[in-house]
Amino acid sequence: TDGSGVNIVVTQSHLRAHANSESPAPAQALDMAARSSITDDVSKLRKGCRSFLQSSWTETFVAMVILVNFLMICLETDSEADFPGRSIGGPPSSWVSYLMDACFLTFVLEFVLRVFVEQRMIL
């Protein structure tokens, strides 16, 4: 009984025939084909991301973002510092904050792409 009051009868010969069948059921074959297609698509995407991350243009861009971030940190620190004979420092200009946020988002995006590409090798 399957819990709904319907009797299910499976004979041993039926189980043996199913266990010995060499070809998967049509539903299983479709499921395996779909998984294979998805795996191939992910593999192609991973290869494309790897070539993008390793390109000289991307590495140059990330190096420039690091330099801009360094300059923004200097400007932010300078604006908040107290200098003798000068008024008390305050928050940095809004454009400094926006540029720092853009740098941070760039770093996060690069990190996520590298984790996706490298997978287990990164840990």
Image (spheres, rainbow, N blue to C red):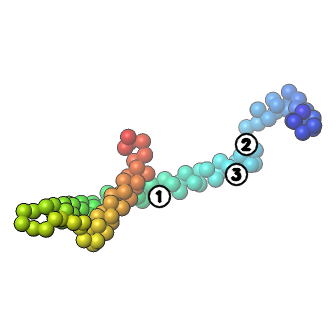
Report, in whole angstroms, how far the alpha carbon at label 3 lies from the one at label 2: 9 Å
Asked whether the residues under the numbered discs 1 and 3 touch, taking CB atoms below 8 Å apart as contact, a structural biologist would say no
| Residue at image location 93% in from the left, 37% down from the top | 5
Circle 2: element type: loop
| Residue at image location 88% in from the left, 29% down from the top | 11
The amino acid type found where label 2 is placed reads Pro
105 or 23: nearer the eye? 105
The amino acid type found where label 1 is placed reads Leu
Circle 1: element type: helix
Does 117 sit above or below residue 96?
above
| Residue at image location 87% in from the left, 35% down from the top | 2
Residue 104 quadrant: bottom left
Label ID, residue 45: 1
Circle 3: element type: helix
Precedes in sequence: disc 1 or disc 3: 3
| Residue at image location 42% in from the left, 59% down from the top | 48
Report, in whole angstroms, how far the alpha carbon at label 2 lies from the one at label 1: 29 Å
Horizontal relation, residue 29 to residue 39: left or right: right
The mark closer to the camera, 2 or 1, is: 1
Precedes in sequence: disc 3 or disc 2: 2
Question: Looking at the figure, which quarter contains the N terminus?
Answer: top right
45 or 18: nearer the eye? 45
Label ID, residue 30: 3
Does 109 sit above or below residue 95?
above
**Residue 117 in view of the camera:** no
Residue at label 2? 24
